[in-house]
């Protein structure tokens, strides 16, 4: 039986597949792409389904670069 760490290692070493779009894959990001940044959720709420109570309500989250 394969444990999860071995499975992750196996998947990490698989070759990339063609996405079928016909477009070339680029490994370089655009020159104007931000080199650093942050993520902010302010007064964020989340529910799992439309007519249910919020699982998260009025959450503030700051992730620094």
Image (cartoon, grey):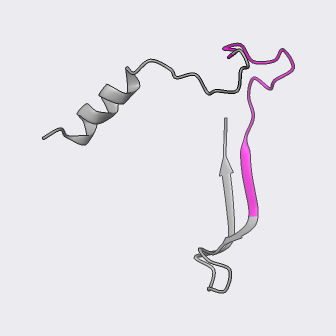
Q: Residue furthest left?
A: 1
Q: Does the magenta stretch include residue 22?
A: no
Q: In this view, does 28 lie above or below 17?
A: above
Q: Position of residue 43 (x, y in %)?
A: 76, 68
42 relative to 13 in the view: left or right: right
Q: Where is residue 45 in the image (x, y as percent from the top left)?
A: 69, 72
**In percent of the image, x 63 and y 80: which residue is there?**
54
Q: In this view, does 47 lie above or below 35?
A: below
Q: How many labels does the image show?
A: 0
Q: Quadrant of residue 28?
A: top right
Q: Where is residue 42 in the image (x, y as percent from the top left)?
A: 76, 62
59 relative to 13 in the view: left or right: right
40 relative to 32 in the view: left or right: left
Q: In this view, does 20 lie above or below 40?
A: above
Which quadrant is the C terminus positioned in? top right
Q: Where is residue 29 in the image (x, y as percent from the top left)?
A: 75, 18
The answer to which of 49 and 24 lies nearer the viewer is: 24
**In percent of the image, x 24 and y 32: which residue is there?**
6
Magenta segment: 25-42
**In percent of the image, x 70 and y 27: which residue is there?**
21
Which quadrant is the N terminus positioned in? top left
Q: Is residue 32 magenta?
A: yes
**What secondary structure characterizes most of the magenta part?**
loop
The answer to which of 18 and 52 lies nearer the viewer is: 18
5 relative to 55 in the view: left or right: left
């Amino acid at each position: 039986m394969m444990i999860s760490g071995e499975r992750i290692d196996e998947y990490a070493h698989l070759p990339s597949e063609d996405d079928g779009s016909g477009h070339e894959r680029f490994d370089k990001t655009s020159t104007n792409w931000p080199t650093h940044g942050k993520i902010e959720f302010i007064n964020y709420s989340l529910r799992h389904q439309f007519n249910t109570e919020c699982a998260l309500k009025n959450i503030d989250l700051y992730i620094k670069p």
